[in-house]
Image: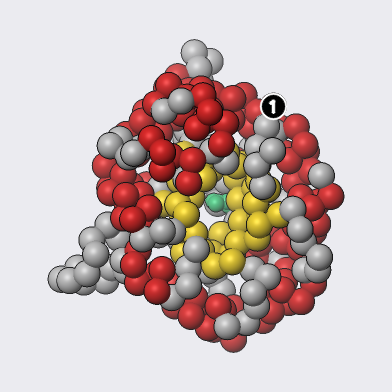
Amino acid sequence: MLKKIVIGNWKMNPVSLKDADKLFSSAAKSISKVRKTEIVICPPFIYLERLRKLSKKINLGAQDTFWGDVGAFTGEVSAEMLYNLGVKYTIVGHSERRALGEENIDINKKLKALLSARITPILCVGETSRDESHEYFNVVRTQIKECLSGINKNLISKIIIAYEPVWAISSTPNRRDATALDSREMSVFIRKVLSDIATPAIAKDTRVIYGGSVSERDAEEFLRYGGVDGVLSGRASLTAEKFVKIIKIAESI
Ligand code: PGA
């Protein structure tokens, strides 16, 4: 079995370093004796350096990166810069970035940059809506194929694939809950796609996780029955007690 992972995506929160410090420290303080679960928090870039100094129990992740190494790219942050700061994971292809115009071709370049900087990429995929003819499976297949295009097969299992159906994410208007069965079906499908791109063994070794309004109330359901190796939580990760509860659930399974 692959090691479980619980990731908190803080998105563009909180508004001050002081609040970031407080949230991170109170989560770190309540985490004890975690053996089976990797814990990651992805705060905004500007808090990374400070938070790194606060606790070793929580790994740091970024929410995005740029594909260039260094140079004239105003406003961007490279994978190597993140690595030099102690960042171990980075989310790419989040639906909120795709909504701002990011495409699979950009995500592909970012994945390559992260892998060469020895950072574990967390690749988000997921359909915006579901349809009766199951077209959404093809949407996810295309995302995976285009994002992984040209990446050495042997590096694929270093990538964590986060299935995040956009219709279940907390910021989506009129959102609805996804079920563990939705997650299970898609995780099987994602592994099938990975096995076609690489090999069945590589697909088996690649972590697939679920994200979309995961809370302390349903994390157990997804972790036990959702066919996934972890969860990516947004809103719930902004409350230390809820995030820690999710970690304890993961640890107990
Ligand atoms: P959510 O966010 O848990 O608030 O739905 C998850 C995500 O968008 O990564």
Q: Which quadrant is the C terminus positioned in?
A: top right
Q: Which residue was labeled with disc 1?
A: 181
Q: Is residue 204 left or right of residue 215?
A: left
Q: Which is more toward the observer, 132 or 64?
A: 64
The residue positioned 76% from the left and 58% from the top of the image is 35
The answer to which image quadrant residue 204 occupies is: top right
Query: Which residue is drawn at the image coordinates 32% and 49% (left, top)?
Result: 112
Which residue is most to the top? Answer: 133
| Image height of 154 relative to 106, above or below | above
Looking at the picture, which amino acid does disc 1 mark? Leu
Residue 74 shows in this picture: yes
Residue 234 to residue 230: above or below: below
- Left or right of residue 146, residue 240 in this image: right
Q: At which x and y percent is residue 11?
A: 51, 62
Mark 1: secondary structure: helix
Residue 152 placement (x, y as % from top left) = 34, 39
